[in-house]
Image: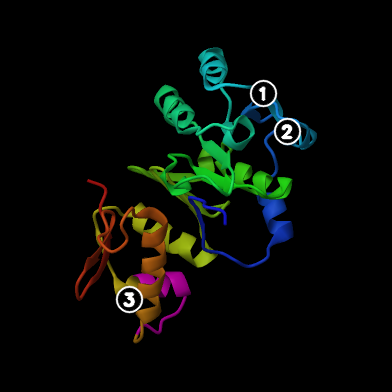
């Protein structure tokens, strides 16, 4: 079963829309760290055919040397192909380039894959399309469509939010709710105001569905949703985004 830190809240099939949203940046650069095993096909050819510029190395040491003079957009570590633990490589890359997204690939018998400090952990077997789907949200986006407040970043067009090492895809309604909170950090937003804006209605007698959506946002951005650090409840009034 795949273990992924990329949290998806919109399960609807939007194939055409997603294809339009996630067109590959021309010559987006990927650093691929993989071993050479006869029983394991390489991802190099498939990714290159999709328009990515691929640099392939066979060790963490070679990867760090490459990072000295290159600036890839994403790093893929195929630990399964190297018959290696791979955690040391992840840590070394995180120290060398803290903001560089990392995808970690391993096998079904890997111990505690959830402990790997990567943006996404994929467990073999999976399709090339699944890998592509995990790469695209990690690529650079147009800054004009990005709202940033403290450690939070919201892409309104692509409908994702990032907070520290967490990234989540959101429904359109969750995007609006997150945007309202981020536009007025530190302010208490009344329940009725939020409900009216997000659901575009003057009827605010029953706002319980707002609580459900707030809980989904907390799952997306909070390390511990039961003890939120960012999205705070102000009892009897509404919600506040804390960035301090």
Name the front one of labels 3 and 2.
2
Depth check: give the residue in front, 160 or 202.
160
Residue located 47% across and 39% down the image: 118
> Residue 154 in magenta?
no
Of the residues under marks 3 and 1, which one precedes in the sequence?
Answer: 1
The magenta span reads: 194-204
Percent coordinates x, y for residue 212 in the rendering:
39, 74
Residue tagged by mark 2?
Answer: 42
Residue tagged by mark 1?
Answer: 56
Depth check: give the residue in front, 98 or 187.
98
Of the residues under marks 3 and 2, which one precedes in the sequence?
Answer: 2
Residue tagged by mark 3?
Answer: 192
- Secondary structure found at label 1: strand
Tag 2 near tag 1, CB within 8 Å: yes
In 3D space, how far apart are the residues under numbered discs 3 and 1 (Cα atoms)?
54 Å
Label 3, residues with CA under 10 Å away: few <14, some 14-19, many ≥20? some
Tag of residue 203: none
């Amino acid at each position: 079963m795949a273990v992924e830190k990329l949290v998806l809240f919109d399960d609807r099939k939007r194939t055409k829309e997603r294809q339009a949203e996630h067109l590959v940046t021309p010559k987006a650069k990927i650093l691929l760290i993989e071993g050479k095993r006869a029983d394991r096909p390489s991802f190099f050819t498939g990714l290159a055919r999709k328009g990515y510029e691929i640099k392939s190395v066979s060790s963490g040491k070679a990867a760090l040397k490459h990072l000295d003079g290159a600036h890839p957009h994403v790093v893929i570590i195929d630990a399964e192909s190297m018959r290696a633990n791979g955690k040391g490589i992840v840590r070394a890359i995180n120290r060398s380039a803290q903001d560089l997204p990392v995808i970690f690939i391993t096998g079904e018998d890997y111990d505690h894959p959830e402990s790997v400090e990567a943006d996404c952990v994929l467990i073999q077997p999976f399709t090339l399309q699944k890998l592509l789907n995990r790469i695209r949200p990690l690529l650079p986006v147009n800054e004009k469509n990005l709202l940033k407040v403290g450690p939070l970043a919201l892409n309104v067009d692509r409908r994702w939010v990032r907070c520290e090492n967490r990234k989540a895809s959101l429904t359109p309604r969750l995007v609006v709710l997150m945007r309202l909170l981020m536009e007025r950090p530190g302010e208490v937003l009344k329940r009725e105001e939020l409900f009216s804006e997000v659901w575009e209605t003057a009827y605010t007698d029953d706002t319980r569905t707002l609580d459900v959506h707030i809980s989904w946002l907390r799952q997306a951005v909070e390390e511990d949703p039961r003890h939120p650090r960012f999205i705070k409840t102000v009892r009897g009034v509404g919600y506040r985004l804390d960035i301090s």
